[in-house]
Amino acid sequence: MSARFNGRTVLVTGAGSGLGQAIALAFASEGASVVAAGRSAVTLAETVALIEKAGGTAAAVTADVSRSDDVRELVRATVGRYGTLDIAVNNAGILRGAGQPAGEISEEDWDAVLRTNVTGVWLAMKHQIAHMAQNGGGTIVNISSNLGAHMRIPNLAAYITSKAAVSALTRAAALDHIHQGIRINAVSPGAAIAPMSLRPGENDADRIERLKSENPLGRAAAAAEIAAAVLYLASPDAGSAVGTDLVVDSGSSA
């Protein structure tokens, strides 16, 4: 285990599976005390168990990022458990309305995606910033996507709109709060080895074959590769990165 984040407390939303779980594991492996947050106590317990099995320190807190009270209590629980909140990774997100043209997405799906993916990130930052601004600053990394500000594909309008908003929100917030010692950046992954990158009816083997010709690198990114980008932006090595949107997508949007 590395000691790059020894003594640091890291909050990761959407940490029960996929990229969020990989990010939580990566921070813990480098010495951080991790709070794994999400809506499912069962999957969060699995993340915590994996971290503790590897010798790390973690706790699980259930929260829905689309609810302000939940996020407020999440930050309070994090500080109550470990005494501080140094780094936050806002990873929680959903995909609904996939495969439908923009004009045919249901209002329910549209509202759900925007509520979680955009308002959820804003609410998370709102409460994280409130603590950090009073306690010497901190670092926030939002998980956006290469779909949105960087590229578009058909029939994913709700998700694409939400992630373009996350990229813009990250840059705006970075400018608003850097004077308080809070560095805010984003990572925009492309297809990664995580459940959300599977298309309807597709399995892991299908995804491997599709990506051989779909992106320049010819493969999905490993979840650990995305996590490494997040840890870089959260580390002192990226001390002058403010409002950066780091695309890690195997060359898809190059």
Image (cartoon, rainbow, N blue to C red):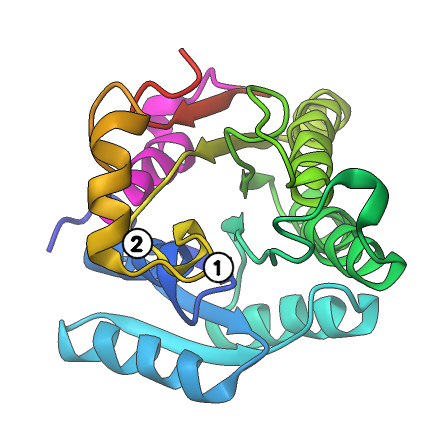
Under circle 1, the secondary element is strand
Determine whether, in the image, residue 25 is placed left or right of residue 10.
left
Vertical order, 158 against 28 (above or below): above
Q: Residue at x 48, y 59 (%)?
A: 12
Q: Is residue 101 above or below residue 218?
A: below
Q: Which residues are magenta?
A: 222-241
- Circles 2 and 1, Cβ within 8 Å, touching? The answer is yes
- Please indicate, yes or no, whether residue 158 appears anywhere in the rendered image: yes
**Residue ID for mark 1:** 12
Q: Residue at x 30, y 57 (%)?
A: 22
Q: Is residue 237 magenta?
A: yes
Sequence order check, earlier mark of 2 and 1:
1
User: Farthest residue in the right direction?
Assistant: 107
User: How far apart are labels 2 and 1 at the CA level?
Assistant: 10 Å
In the rendered image, residue 61, in percent from the top left (x then y), is placed at 54, 79
The quadrant holding residue 54 is bottom left
Residue 58 image point, x, y percent: 35, 74
Residue type at mark 2?
Phe
The residue under label 2 is 27
